[in-house]
Image: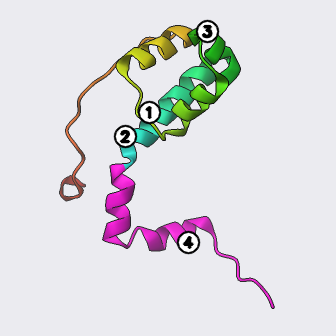
């Protein structure tokens, strides 16, 4: 029995044809963006999760949870993370992107 390979890009192309998948993916955009920002801030500070945890007075597991995007931290936690990584916390509001506004 041989296994058929499927490239991730090919699978994604199929998934994005499904409106339900697109809606679910879009609903997670903010969580992905936050997780990416946290990881980027830590990396730019040349810190490990353990380093950030020590600076924040918490555990490495708590930092891993923050960076996983599985939870939505409070602004106080985000400020503590910013302080620990030597960054400045900025929060802004943007109008959502609409598929009908695409050029």
Q: Which x, y percent locates residue 86?
A: 54, 8
Q: Look at the image and tell me in which quarter the C terminus lies.
A: bottom left
**Proximity of marks 2 and 1: CB atoms separated by less than 8 Å:** yes
Distance of mark 2 from mark 1, alpha carbons? Answer: 6 Å
- Reading the image, the residue beneath label 3 is 55
Helix, strand or loop at label 3? It is helix
Residue count near mark 2 (Cα–Cα under 10 Å), binned few <14, some 14–19, many ≥20: few
Asked if 95 appears above or below 40 in the picture, the reply is: below
Q: Which residue is mark 1?
A: 34
Circle 3 Cα neighbour tier, 10 Å, few/some/many (<14 / 14–19 / ≥20): some
**Residue 57 image position (x, y, % from top left):** 59, 10
Q: Earlier in the sequence, mark 3 or mark 4?
A: 4
Circles 4 and 1 in contact, beta carbons < 8 Å: no
Q: Which element type, helix, strand or loop, lies under badge 4?
A: helix
- Main SS, magenta region, reads helix
Tell me how the rendering is colored: rainbow
The mark closer to the camera, 3 or 4, is: 3
Cα distance in 3D space between marks 2 and 3: 26 Å
- Disc 4 or 1, which lies upstream in sequence? 4
Q: Which residues are magenta?
A: 1-27
- In front: label 1 or label 3: 3
Foreground of the two, 42 or 64: 64
Dot 4 corresponds to which residue? 10
Earlier sequence position, callout 2 versus callout 3: 2
Residue under pointer 2: 30
Residue 28 shows up from this direction: yes
Tell which tag, 4 or 1, sits nearer the viewer: 1
Residue 52's place in the image compared with 9, above or below, is above
Give the mark nearer the N terminus: 1 vs 3. 1
Residue 32 location, quadrant:
top left
Mark pair 3, 4: CA separation: 42 Å
| Label located before the other in sequence (4 or 2) | 4
């Amino acid at each position: 029995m041989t296994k058929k390979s499927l490239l991730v890009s090919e699978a994604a192309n199929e998934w994005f044809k499904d409106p339900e998948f697109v809606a679910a993916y879009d609903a997670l955009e903010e969580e992905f963006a936050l997780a990416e920002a946290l990881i980027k801030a830590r990396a730019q500070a040349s810190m490990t999760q353990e380093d950030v945890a020590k600076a924040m007075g918490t555990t490495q597991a708590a930092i891993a949870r923050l960076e996983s995007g599985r939870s939505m931290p409070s602004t106080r936690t985000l400020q503590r993370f910013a302080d620990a990584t030597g960054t400045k916390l900025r929060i802004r509001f943007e109008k959502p992107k609409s598929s009908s506004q695409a050029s």
